Amino acid sequence: MPRNTVVNQEALRFNKLLIRVRASLVDIGKAVKGLVIMGPDLEDVANGILLNKQPDFWKKVSYPSLKPMSSYVADLVARMNFFTDWMDNGHPANYWLSGFFFTQSFLTGQLQNFARKNNLPIDTLIWTFDILKKENNHPPKPEDGCVVYGLFMDGARWDNDHQVIQDSLPKVLFSEIPHMHWKPCEKDK
């Protein structure tokens, strides 16, 4: 199955990041041995490792993240696993939306697929959303649109029993939204 443009673009962005991460870590090893000079970028990476802080040198080519270094690396590995699985096994049934570098490309691609399938102009389409029940964590791939996960609410939560947004629980700032089915439809319908 040929890979589509979206996953290829994501792979290019992740490869650029991984090349920078690997090269800087190799160079730190060389700098510790006295084989290369510890310049400002390497010093930034070394300090990031010591302070558990994502280095600015990596941030320049990274996806947005406020996580400390250890959590950032774990997140990067999870993202790599998601996209590796997609490339090896084809389109997943559910997409980790917050795992993308550039979500707009993915969402526009979904709209384009729907527009082509239904012979509609893409600029006449909008998204509709259905939040799925929490117990349905691995729904099958829908005929139209996509099922996404990895989105969060700030200061609110999804009440699965009543299917409405409610106030956050005490001492809970962020809450994960259950899987959502994003369906394209015509604006006028």
Image (spheres, helix red, strand yellow):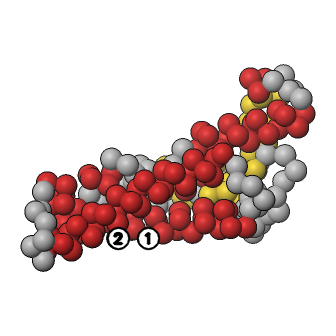
Query: Looking at the image, can residue 52 be seen?
Result: no
x and y, in percent, of residue 36 in the image: 13, 66
- The answer to whether 1 appears left or right of 150 in the picture is right
Mark 1 near mark 2, Cβ–Cβ under 8 Å? yes
- The answer to whether 170 appears left or right of 88 in the picture is left
x and y, in percent, of residue 6 in the image: 64, 47
Q: Residue at x 73, y 67 (%)?
A: 89
- For the residues labelled 1 and 2, the Cα–Cα distance comes to 6 Å
Figure check: 30 above or below 143: below
- Place residue 25 in its image quadrant: bottom left
175, 15: nearer the viewer: 15
- Place residue 121 in its image quadrant: top right
Label 2: how many Cα within 10 Å (few below 14, some 14–19, many 20+): some
Return the residue at label 2: 70
x and y, in percent, of residue 77 in the image: 48, 69
- Which residue type carries mark 2? Ser
Query: Looking at the image, can residue 65 be seen?
Result: yes
184, 100: nearer the viewer: 100
Figure check: 129 above or below 97: above
- Place residue 105 in its image quadrant: top right
**Secondary structure under the numbered disc 1 in the rendered image:** helix
Residue 74 bears which disc, if any? 1
Q: Residue at x 81, y 58 (%)?
A: 141
- Which residue type carries mark 1? Ala
